Image (cartoon, helix red, strand yellow):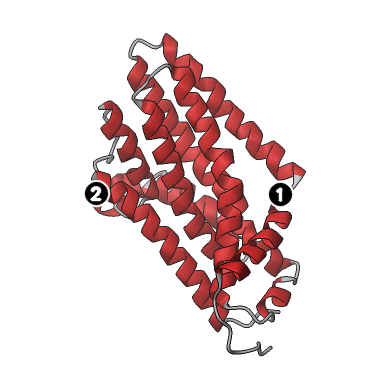
Amino acid sequence: MTATTGRTPTLGAAVEIAGLVLRSLVTRGRLIALGGLGLLVAGLGATARAADDQVDAATDLIAGLGLSVVAPVATLVVASAALGDLRDDKTLVYLWLRPISRLSIALGAVMASLAVALPLVVVPIFVSAVLSGVGDLLAASLLAATMAVVAYTGLFVAVGMRLSRPFLWGLVYILAWEGFIALAGDGTARISIRSYTWSILARATGTDLRLADRSAAASVLVPTLILVAGTALTTWWLNHREID
């Protein structure tokens, strides 16, 4: 199917697309499931107060559960569905044929995903840091959780656009790559989102987290570049694939 040419990317078009995608993403089932996951990590923050080393316990909890489970899984559920659901139910073609740029569609999907995923991830992780009573974790948890959502959104919006069963492929990445292969050495860890978000926590608290030795600049720059790259790939695939 051939689409209209001469499209110009505009912020207004991206916002309009974001609104359309947002309505498809915000379902009661998703909010209940992801909200429950967030409540778990938030509530467990209080348990760190009873630990012998309160700082290490709180940091390990937020890194191991918040940034390694809640952030990637919640963002995967949302971002992979942003365009993936529209493609699967054959409605993406109606956006694809409109006289707007492919970049506007990709940006709209990213904006909608961030609007849903950020509060579902950042708020419970921050509450967990507050309940832990570790002051050094407050700003660090906000920044680390935000960077996690930013990076995973770029990755999983692109996965949702390109692959069928994107949730399954996203889980493979989270469990196999980030949970196992990336821990094998520094080389593989450099392309693991987790190592950059963990580095923010490790630097703030002095806790020793495995492979969390990225610089402050890299911990912000790399997740941002992943978002940009994911948006660019999504745009490219929208331009070069037939949509039906």
- Give x and y (percent) for residue 54: 36, 15
**In the rendered image, which quarter is residue 9 located in?**
bottom right
Left or right for 47, reference 193: right
Q: Earlier in the sequence, mark 1 or mark 2?
A: 1
Please report contact status of discs 1 and 2: CB closer than 8 Å, yes or no. Answer: no
- Give x and y (percent) for residue 84: 64, 63
- Kindly state the secondary structure of the residue where label 1 is placed: loop
The mark found on residue 26 in the picture is 1
Going by the numbered disc 1, the residue's amino acid type is Val
- 216 in relation to 153, above or below: above
Residue picked out by circle 2: 186
- Kindly state the secondary structure of the residue where label 2 is placed: helix
What residue is shown at x 34% (from left), y 33% (from top)? Answer: 201
**In the rendered image, which quarter is residue 160 located in?**
bottom right
Q: Residues within 10 Å of mark 2 (few under 14, many from 20)?
A: some
Q: Can residue 213 be seen in this view?
A: yes
- 13 in relation to 77, above or below: below
What residue is shown at x 35% (from left), y 10% (from top)? Answer: 52
Quarter that holds the N terminus: bottom right
What residue is shown at x 38% (from left), y 53% (from top)? Answer: 223
- Give x and y (percent) for residue 204: 29, 31
- 72 in relation to 229, above or below: above
